[in-house]
Image (cartoon, rainbow, N blue to C red):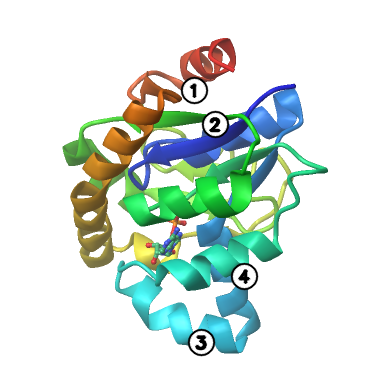
Amino acid sequence: MRPQVIFLGAPGSGKGTQASRLVEGLGYSHISTGDLLRKEMAKKSALGNRVSTIINEGKLVDDQTVLDLLKANCDLVKNQYIFDGFPRNEEQAKMLDGQILGNHKSKVFYFDIDLGDLAERLINRRTCKDCGQIYNMLSRPPKSAGVCDVCGGKNLIQRRDDDAATVKNRLKVFEDTIGPMLSYYKKKGNLVTLDATKDVEQLYGALKNNL
Ligand code: AMP
């Protein structure tokens, strides 16, 4: 039985792309708290309306709200997950272990990359609204402009929080919170650090070898 997987890494470090590969290749289920929150915003639910300003400013939503949303959307008896975007701080790491993972085996992958390289990556990121495929207009653009290589959809969108000012806040929040999380998992002994500057295939190989 493969472990439950936790992805840690700055916004734009390649977690979403690798999650898609693991879903395709090994049958994992991808659960992204950012996606769950954006869905609530799109539905204009009470929760979505409450968190939209926080998200659009690049700040963190409170721990309990995100934990409850995560709990309501995962079933560890049936699925093996990639947790992407949760935890975001040490408190959430403890919540994930104590209230969701319990006795399930887990492996944590840290996508290590210089934060200085990421702002440009994020500002140039586009996502297919139909299938979620991620592109970078500089390094990995779609083969045909504006059209998704995977599903042919014509809705390649920029996330609202991928604008320059919000990106700066999100990277700062990451920088302030990553240290204690890494220490927590280092102590626990289930942390693998990946060189996130490697290309998609190399990174996927390293991930699979460590599962
Ligand atoms: P992401 O798609 O993971 O970059 O998340 C987008 C935004 O959603 C973040 O900038 C936060 O505002 C919010 N968010 C996502 N996951 C969490 C979390 N675990 N805790 C708090 N806020 C979160």
Name the quadrant containing residue 115. top left
Disc 4 to disc 3, C-alpha distance: 11 Å
Labels 4 and 2 touching (C-beta < 8 A):
no
Which amino acid lies under the numbered mark 1 shown in the image of this protein? Answer: Val
Query: Along the polypeptide, which appears first: circle 4 or circle 1?
Result: 4
Taking the image as shown, residue 155 lies to the left or right of residue 169, namely right
Q: Nearer the viewer, residue 55 or 47?
A: 47
Q: Position of residue 209 (x, y in %)?
A: 56, 10
Q: Position of residue 84 (x, y in %)?
A: 52, 46
The N terminus lies in quadrant: top right
Taking the image as shown, residue 117 lies to the left or right of residue 134, namely left
Query: Along the polypeptide, which appears first: circle 2 or circle 1?
Result: 2
Disc 4 to disc 1, C-alpha distance: 27 Å
Q: Mark 2 falls on what kind of element?
A: helix
Q: Which residue is mark 1?
A: 200
Disc 2 to disc 3, C-alpha distance: 30 Å
Which amino acid lies under the numbered mark 2 shown in the image of this protein? Answer: Gln
Label 2 CB-ligand 1 distance < 8 A: no
Query: Along the polypeptide, which appears first: circle 4 or circle 2?
Result: 2
Query: Along the polypeptide, which appears first: circle 3 or circle 1?
Result: 3
Q: Nearer the viewer, residue 151 or 81?
A: 81
Which amino acid lies under the numbered mark 4 shown in the image of this protein? Answer: Lys
Q: Quadrant of ligand 1?
A: bottom left
Q: Residue at x 50, y 73 (%)?
A: 65
Q: Mark 1 falls on what kind of element?
A: helix
Query: Along the polypeptide, which appears first: circle 4 or circle 3?
Result: 4
Labels 2 and 1 touching (C-beta < 8 A):
yes
Answer whether residue 196 is visible to the viewer in this image: yes
- Residue 18: which numbered mark, if any? 2
